[in-house]
Image (cartoon, rainbow, N blue to C red):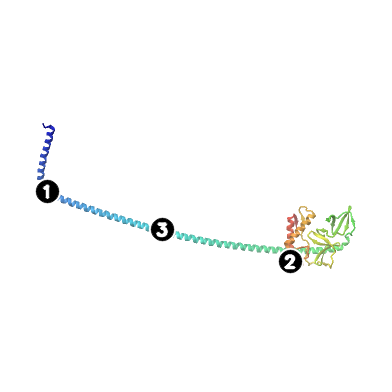
Amino acid sequence: MISSKTLACVRGVLTALVVSAGAVAHADTTGERDRAPRAERSSERRDSAQQQRETRQDRRDDARETRSAVRQDHRDDRRDSVQQQRETRQDRRDDARETRSSVRQDHRDDRRDSAQQQRETRQDRRDDTREIRSAVRQDHRDDRRDTVERQRETRQDRRDDRRDDWRAGHAERRHYPSHGVVIPALPPAHRVVTHRGSRYMFASGVWYRPSGPRFIVIAPPLGIVVPFLPLGYLTLQIGPSRYYYLNDVYYMREPRGYVVVDRPVGTPVYIDDDAPDVEPSLFIYPRYGQSEAQQADDRYECHRWAREQTGFDPSRAMAGWSDAELEFVRADYDRAMAACLDGRGYTVR
């Protein structure tokens, strides 16, 4: 027995077959009727497709040309940019080269100007130094000339004073006390001199020694030294030596002062006003109260030093020296003595 489901399926198939057959018949009828417009539509579609293909080809060509033009523009821009950068770098190199060259030239000019200025400055300094040295030398020459003139005038005054004093001394010679005279007291302005352990007194050209509470006039022992001689002595040149004569006693100059010597042998020559004077021109005062022994030692040491520095010895006759040479060298000797004594605590004028 056939089920209802199967029957329903068969019925559906048959219905479909009937519908399909009707459609085929209808299609054959309408196909003939629509065949002519379809050919036209196919031709139109072909034309449209061809037109679309041409349009797409034109678009592709335009796009290709556009891309080619853009690429060419990019290449041109890059080329222009590279060329511009190259020119910019070249300009910078040229500018830097010119700047370095200008800076080097400026440095060379500055160094040249600085060297020239330094040369001019050194030349100015040399000229100034030369002028200063010339002025100082001229001042020294003027000072020495003035010093020599003053010393010449001073010596002339001393010669005049000694001449007057010597004449007065000879006129008053009878007033010197004789040897052996005993006096109760010494003159106020006397000097005590120690010689070989004994004490002697010297005042106004007269020598004394103690005799109990009194003092006796004596002839001084040989070798005793007195720093200064009073006015009234006579200067004698006997042979190569110079002597100083006072109250029948002969003295010679030495660094410590005037030493008593034997009566010289020979013909005395009295020193006239034109002879060079080598007597001391320094006045020495002990600032610190140095003893006479210390003063004598200091004077001798300074004399040795001044003699070594100048080659001048006032205790010796300077044979072969002209008056002008003696004047200059004596001035140098006095300055050396003054410097040495000042360093040892003396005031020198």
Q: CA distance from mark 2 to mark 3?
A: 86 Å
Could you tell which of marks 2 and 3 lies nearer the N-terminus?
3
Q: Residue 89: which numbered mark, if any?
A: 3
Q: Nearer the viewer, mark 2 or mark 1?
A: 1
Asked if residue 283 shows in the view, the reply is: no
**Residue 75 placement: quadrant:** bottom left
Q: Are marks 2 and 1 in contact (CB under 8 Å)?
A: no
Q: Amino acid at mark 3?
A: Arg
Residue drawn 21% across the image and 52% down it: 53
Residue occupied by mark 1: 35
| Element type at mark 1 | helix
In the picture, the quarter occupied by the N terminus is top left
Name of the residue lying farthest toward the front: 1
Could you tell which of marks 3 and 1 lies nearer the N-terminus?
1
**Residue 171 placement: quadrant:** bottom right
Q: Amino acid at mark 1?
A: Arg
